[in-house]
Image (cartoon, rainbow, N blue to C red):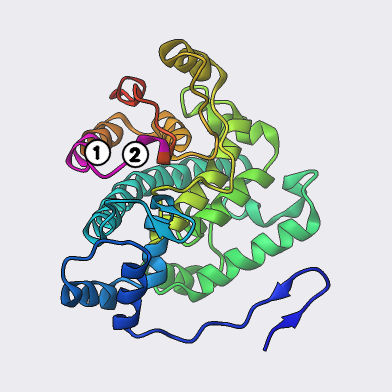
Amino acid sequence: MSHKNDTNEVRELKPAKTYEEQVNILKCRGLYIDDDATAIECLSALNYYRLRGYYIHLQNGDEFMPGVSLSQIVSIHSFDSELRLLLLRLLFDIEIIARTRIAYEIGHAWGPIGYKEEANYEKCNPKDFKDLMDRIQADTDNSKERFIRIHNEKYGHQFPIWVAVETMSFGDLSKLFSLIPPKHQTNIANEYQGLDRVLLRNWLKAFTLLRNICAHNGRIYARFFTDRIRIEKKLEKYIQKTIGSTFAISNKSLFAYLLALRRVSRPETWNYFLSELVSLFEKNASIIELKRIGFPNQWRSILLPK
């Protein structure tokens, strides 16, 4: 039975479908499946609804475009899995560097536990500060890391910033950076070859989103992110000169995120990533579309090794 709220009709949930029923639904919508048994095996490993994210752009309404096959969709899913792992490796390295530089600046400016003093944060919102400190404390209290246990035994729940950053989530690290005064943000941003602090603040927040999507096996392909990432003005001008004004880079696209990731990566890490990315794209050239991740045709020349 349907129920209504103030503006929209709420539909009754559909019953669970067997794997055989799922296969029949896909076939009735025009998806090419050459072997039902193989399709059932596939759907028993990959959630039917998960796969939907990889084929919705291959449909007109509920009907599949001519020639679309289940094997093609599974290949796109496999490509996405490999892309996600590449991004995670890159993000892990960037995260470690950010932890190190933020802890170094705060530790030298405020001392080992000065990060717990609200007065150091100047115009910081008191609730934001308290919420962050509560999460940091919970993370250190709940950590199973041996170095945390040993440090706790020696100093009794007093964790200097260079220890505390190692248990923070990337999201809390980003929040910490956003709360410290601008002069300290600038000092940290300068460690990235004179990066603007406002850009770094925006990027750390966006990187947190991307990392969480990757770490939780979220879809990257054919996805535009909710957090807009800013592009350096000088780079934006260079790109427009290179590819022309007809192509507009979406600041919610993977390509825009990669422009920022390239800027803050170590050369050896970025060069490895780009080499693997080129190989992955070449291997899957027949099934992926660059526009689905916001890439211009000249993407290689723009993302050149550092």
Q: Residue at x 47, y 62 (%)?
A: 167
**Image coords of residue 118 (percent x, y):** 75, 53
**Image coords of residue 232 (percent x, y):** 54, 23
Q: Residue at x 35, y 26 (%)?
A: 299
Crowding near pointer 2: few (<14 within 10 Å), some, many (20+)? Answer: some
Q: Which mark is residue 200?
A: none
- Give the structural element (helix, strand or loop) at label 1: helix
Magenta stretch: give its range. Answer: 277-291
Does the magenta segment cover residue 286?
yes
Residues 252 and 2: in front is 2
Residues 125 and 283: in front is 283
| Left or right: 268, with 54 as reference point | left
Q: Which mark is residue 281?
A: 1
Residue type at mark 1 is Phe
Residues 142 and 242: in front is 242
* Residue 237 sits above or below residue 276 on the image: above
Q: Looking at this rendering, what residue extends furthest in the right direction?
A: 6
Q: Residue at x 49, y 46 (%)?
A: 207
Residue type at mark 2 is Glu
**Image coords of residue 24 (percent x, y):** 32, 76
Provide the residue designation for mark 2: 289
Q: Looking at this rendering, what residue extends furthest in the bottom direction?
A: 1
